[in-house]
Amino acid sequence: MLAPLDLQFYNSRWALIGTKEELGKELSKITRIPIEAITAARSLRSFSAAARMSWASERVTTREEDIAYCLLGLFDVHMPLVYGEGNKAFYRLQEEIIKKTFDPSLFAWQPDDETAQTYLSVLATSPADFRKCGLTRPFMSPISEYSMTNRGLKMTASLIPYESPSQHIDEQLWSNILPIGVHEPGSWAFGIVLLRTAPGVYIRLASPGFVPLKEDFDEDGPSGECWGHLADGITHAFHILADIDEDTVVSQANELRRIFCPRSVELQAGANYAPSYRGRLAGVHTLPPLPYYITAFSSVAMVFGRPFPFGIIFDSRENVVYPKCLLIDKSTWYSRLFFLLLLRDPNTPMSWDIVNKELPEISGLTDHLIMEYEGKSFELAARVIEPKGYQRTPRLDVTVAMLGPSATTKVHEPNLAPCCEHLPPMG
């Protein structure tokens, strides 16, 4: 119906009923295909991949492979026809679409039937999974690129921490939202929920299917006021699994060494300046598989409403389960140390041998920092402690305490300028 420029409809007696231009409204109502596509008033490429898939959601073919092969022209792709491969043909079709287009709405599908699966592939099983996507357009801003690899879908994007309603506390901590689509009418953006299973590797959760994003998604302040900001403000590369084996995924997840980390801590002013700790925007940091690797991440301490950014390095050489913490004052450490350890890909660790040789100043770091603000001195300290309650993951305990009047420190104001502006030349 879409391919022919001139299409005429006849009844069983071969009497002309009308052309597709004349019957456009009726055809659109029956097929749920926009009339602009039927009459060629709009290019097919102007419709999202999810919307075009939804047009074939009720298509039935004699051979299973033809449900994929009949869509080649709709997406302007080419691939060999291999009868006998079954539903693998539809997986190949999606891979070809990924090679040719940049449209994350291709991942905005839901299982056609209720599934008992916990995890889903990033790729759909048939066009029927796109039945509810007729009014979907892509949400483009947080994704810079993606491609299929032997590990699954490789993507460079930002993930949003998701406070999952799951009863499993670890699953709540490891979940993230990948924004992929916008639903019309109303223009509300949504994403799929991913669970981190290994460093740089995620898997799609079957439930919930879609999660709407808050309106303040792009409002990312230095203290991270809401969960709707881009995670850590850093775009990074990761993989989403396409070939799903639940037993393998679970066993790999259980073998990882993780630490539950707050992304920010806050000191509230009481009647007697009594400090109180509150972790905000919790996440899970995955440690490298071998203890002689070093990893680090950024955080911020809110002291009486003022941000003091700092970095934390994990040293697992003496204890792989509860590593030692080394703290970096980001307001004064404009150096190769901060650049290499905090601005690099967190999923690509460095060895301690290289760091000690190239950056000997790391030996001066400890598990605490002294800060001063408006005549008051504070100590920031960090350590990894045993899990509590329903948690199975060791926890990073970050505390901010007020010191006595005898403490003397170098006074500095928080400097939130981009760190790379003052980096010295790298040797």
Image: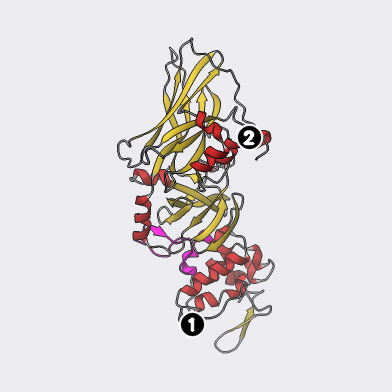
Q: Which residues are magenta?
A: 107-135
Q: Is residue 352 magenta?
A: no
* Image quadrant containing the C terminus: top right
Q: Where, quadrant-wise, is the N terminus in this rendering?
A: bottom right
Residue underneath mark 2: 419
**Residue 255: horizontal and vertical position, in percent?**
36, 51
Which amino acid, mark 1?
Answer: Tyr
Q: Please identify the residue farthest to the bottom as the structure is shown.
A: 13
Provide the residue designation for mark 1: 83
Nearer to me, 168 or 359: 359
Instruction: Indicate the secondary structure of the residue bearing disc 1.
Output: loop
Looking at the image, which residue is at 51% across and 26% down?
302
Q: Is residue 414 visible?
A: yes
The residues tagged by marks 1 and 2 sit, at their Cα atoms, a distance apart of 56 Å
Residue 305 appears left or right of 420: left
Q: Against 334, is 122 above or below?
A: below
Identify the secondary structure beneath mark 2: helix
